[in-house]
């Protein structure tokens, strides 16, 4: 009985000691300075500065480097005829794939 109470007492003491040491020193803790809300003009100026820095960083990246943005899409839009032709081609390829599929096999669905 003595050994059980002694071992439980030591375990409980260790549990409380870990919590007490995790707190740190009360006098050594410094609070952060009070936050002052930024005005809309300050926010806009900071945003413009970050945007300029980001644009400069993108210009300095070499091709193929991580973080490089893709080239903007071409200004030419696909005509309705081109879209219809591409849709017909995809539909024909899908029908051909279904025909060549072994019977009873279930393929991926969209």
Image (cartoon, helix red, strand yellow):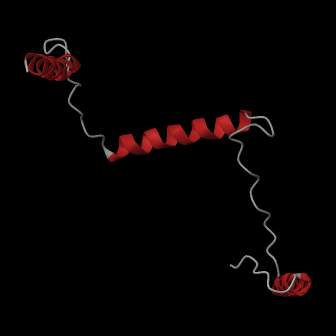
| Residue at horizontal 72 percent and vertical 42 percent from the top | 68
| Image x and y of residue 50, in percent | 52, 38
Q: Nearer the viewer, residue 41 or 9?
A: 9
| Residue at horizontal 55 percent and vertical 42 percent from the top | 51
| Image x and y of residue 2, in percent | 7, 16
Residue 24: image quadrant is top left
Determine whether, in the image, residue 28 is placed left or right of residue 78.
left
| Residue at horizontal 81 percent and vertical 77 percent from the top | 78
Determine whether, in the image, residue 27 is placed left or right of residue 73.
left
Determine whether, in the image, residue 79 is placed left or right of residue 110.
right
Q: Nearer the viewer, residue 102 or 76?
A: 102
Above-or-below relation of 39 to 11: below
Q: Quadrant of the C terminus?
A: bottom right
Above-or-below relation of 5 to 87: above
| Image x and y of residue 91, in percent | 84, 86
Residue 13: image quadrant is top left
Q: Nearer the viewer, residue 20 or 40?
A: 20
Residue 73: image quadrant is bottom right
Q: Quadrant of the N terminus?
A: top left
Q: Nearer the viewer, residue 3 or 75?
A: 3
| Image x and y of residue 12, in percent | 14, 23
| Residue at horizontal 30 percent and vertical 43 percent from the top | 39
Determine whether, in the image, residue 59 is placed left or right of residue 20.
right
Above-or-below relation of 43 to 26: below
């Amino acid at each position: 009985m003595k050994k059980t109470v002694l071992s439980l007492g030591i375990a409980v003491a260790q549990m409380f000691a870990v919590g007490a040491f995790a707190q740190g020193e009360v006098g050594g803790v410094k609070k952060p300075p009070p936050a002052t809300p930024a005005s809309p003009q300050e926010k806009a100026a900071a945003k413009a500065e970050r945007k300029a820095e980001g644009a400069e960083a993108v210009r300095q990246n070499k091709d193929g480097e991580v973080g490089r943005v893709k080239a903007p899409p071409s200004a030419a839009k696909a005509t309705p005829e081109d879209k219809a032709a591409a849709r017909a081609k995809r539909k024909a390829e899908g029908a051909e794939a279904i025909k060549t599929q072994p019977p009873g096999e279930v393929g991926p669905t969209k």
